[in-house]
């Protein structure tokens, strides 16, 4: 597969993005790992001009809506930094079973690394209207409800649903 997996069709407009852990491994059940994701978004908002409109982090994937002048580079940087940092955290905590799975998931042609954390691609979808933005925000916020983890979206701590409900979320977002 070519580098087109990071193509963002119109970087000056918001995109709905999905990032999935290889083999759908439940890595985001660990708070210290989720903190890596949240801190990366905070950094990108402060230093790279990322506008983060909404997000949800599930145990093995995440959805978010973002916009930046160079969203493709922000996405590549996010996945690269968080992948390396999460692997380092798993090594420090000696999560050998997860590390073994991440090692075996690495594609043979990837000679620059020992592990593969993220599945390739991000399924970027351009947000074309206010209605589509509302639909995508509702979709990502409803993820933990549909899975039966919570009764109301704002009960899920790793989601911007709290921000939209007027509560304090885990990180600041750029409300739509």
Image: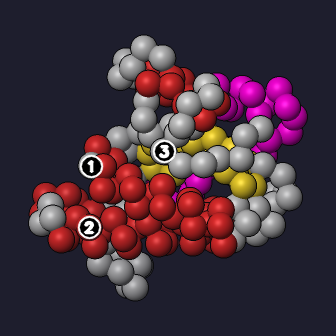
- Looking at the image, tell me whether mark 3 or mark 2 is earlier in sequence order: 2
Specify the label residue 154 is tagged with.
none
Secondary structure beneath dot 3 equals loop
> Is 106 inside the magenta-drawn segment?
no
Tell me, what colour scheme is on the image?
secondary structure
Residue 73 appears in the picture as rendered: no
Left or right: residue 168 versus residue 29 is right
Residue at mark 2: 89
Left or right: residue 30 versus residue 76 is left
Nearest-to-viewer mark from 1 and 3:
3
Give the residue drawn at x 43%, y 30%: 156
Residue 139's image quarter? top right
Specify the label residue 30 is tagged with.
1
User: Disc 1 versus disc 3: distance between alpha carbons?
Assistant: 15 Å
Residue 165's image quarter? top right
Give the residue drawn at x 41%, y 78%: 110
- Asked if the residues shown at circle 1 and circle 2 are in contact, with their CB atoms under 8 angstroms apart, the answer is yes
Crowd class of label 1 (few under 14; some 14 to 19; many from 20; radius 10 Å) = few
- Looking at the image, tell me whether mark 1 or mark 3 is earlier in sequence order: 1
Residue 147's image quarter? top left
Secondary structure beneath dot 2 equals helix
Query: Where residue 93 sits in the image (x, y, percent)?
Result: 15, 64
Query: Where residue 109 sits in the image (x, y, percent)?
Result: 41, 79
The span picked out in magenta is 118-138
- Looking at the image, tell me whether mark 1 or mark 2 is earlier in sequence order: 1
Q: Where is 55 relative to 115, above or below?
A: above
Residue at mark 3: 170
Crowd class of label 2 (few under 14; some 14 to 19; many from 20; radius 10 Å) = some
């Amino acid at each position: 597969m070519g580098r087109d997996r990071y193509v963002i069709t119109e970087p000056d407009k918001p995109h709905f993005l999905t990032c999935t852990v290889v083999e759908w491994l439940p890595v985001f059940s660990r708070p210290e790992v989720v903190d890596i994701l949240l801190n990366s978004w905070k950094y990108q908002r402060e230093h790279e001009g990322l506008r983060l409109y909404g997000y949800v982090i599930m145990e093995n994937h995440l959805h978010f809506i973002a916009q930046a002048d160079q969203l493709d580079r922000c996405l590549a940087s996010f996945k690269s930094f968080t992948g390396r940092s999460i692997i380092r955290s798993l090594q420090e905590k000696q999560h050998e079973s997860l590390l073994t799975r991440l090692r075996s998931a690495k594609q043979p042609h990837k000679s620059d690394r020992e592990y593969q954390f993220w599945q390739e691609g991000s399924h970027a979808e351009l947000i074309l209207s206010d209605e589509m933005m509302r639909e995508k925000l509702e979709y990502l916020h409803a993820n933990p409800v549909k899975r039966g983890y919570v009764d109301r979206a704002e009960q899920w701590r790793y989601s911007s649903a709290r921000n939209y409900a007027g509560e304090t979320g885990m990180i600041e977002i750029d409300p739509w």
